[in-house]
Amino acid sequence: MRNCTLVTAGLFSLALAMPLALGLQSEAAPSTQPSGGSNVADSAAGWLAFGQALTMDESKTVTVEAVLADPAAFAGKAVRLSGAISKVCKPKGCWMQFTAPATEKGKGIPVFVKFTCPIDGRLIPLDAVGKQAIVEGTLDVVEISEVEARHYLEDEGASAQEIAKIVGPQKQVRVQGPGALVKQ
């Protein structure tokens, strides 16, 4: 897999902090997780940990919607992001996306979260789609190449017609970070 660096974890953390800050707290997630491992279960809290431990304060959590309302305000900053997972890399689970709900202006924009590709097996399970997650990392607004954008669509299992629609560089809101929590 190309470009399998750790990007995804930070987005999850950011989405969690905003509801807490706004008093919209639903089910609280643990602020930390066991370090150094992936697929570490915290069954008492009902979260599954992937990658490194989350270290930011829960009160700093923001939602995907808050980030997508003004990505430039978060660019280059460490974030703890919370949201629902909309897509996961089918071959290895090395990336996932959060998508804000569609608005009258158009369909939802994704926040891309990228992890280091696992050597064997997969990282984020396919059944994580639709589940709440928290990630931490640095948020960036970048331009990715047509080749890279097409690669991610291939990972999703998109049709050749969908892939062919990608022309030129594409804007991407992404998080680079080392860990994630997924609600079970």
Image (cartoon, rainbow, N blue to C red):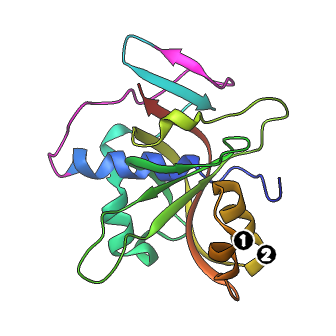
Residue 144 image point, x, y percent: 70, 76
Region rendered in magenta: 22-42
Q: How far apart are marks 2 and 1 (CA)?
A: 5 Å
94 relative position to 33: left or right: right
Residue 177 image point, x, y percent: 62, 48
Residue marked by disc 1: 150
Q: Quadrant of residue 150?
A: bottom right
Farthest-out residue, top: 44
- Residue 147, which numbered label? 2
* Main SS category, magenta section: loop
167 relative position to 135: left or right: right
- Badge 1 density bin: few <14, some 14–19, many ≥20, Cα 10 Å: many
Please name the amino acid that badge 1 sits on: Arg
Q: In which quarter of the image is residue 63?
A: bottom left
Residue 90 is covered by the magenta coloring: no
Query: Does residue 55 appear in the picture of this structure?
Result: no
- In the picture shown, does residue 182 fall above or below 90? above
Farthest-out residue, bottom: 168
Please name the amino acid that badge 2 sits on: Val
Q: Residue at x 37, y 51 (%)?
A: 15
Q: Residue at x 45, y 55 (%)?
A: 98
Q: Are marks 2 and 1 in contact (CB under 8 Å)?
A: yes
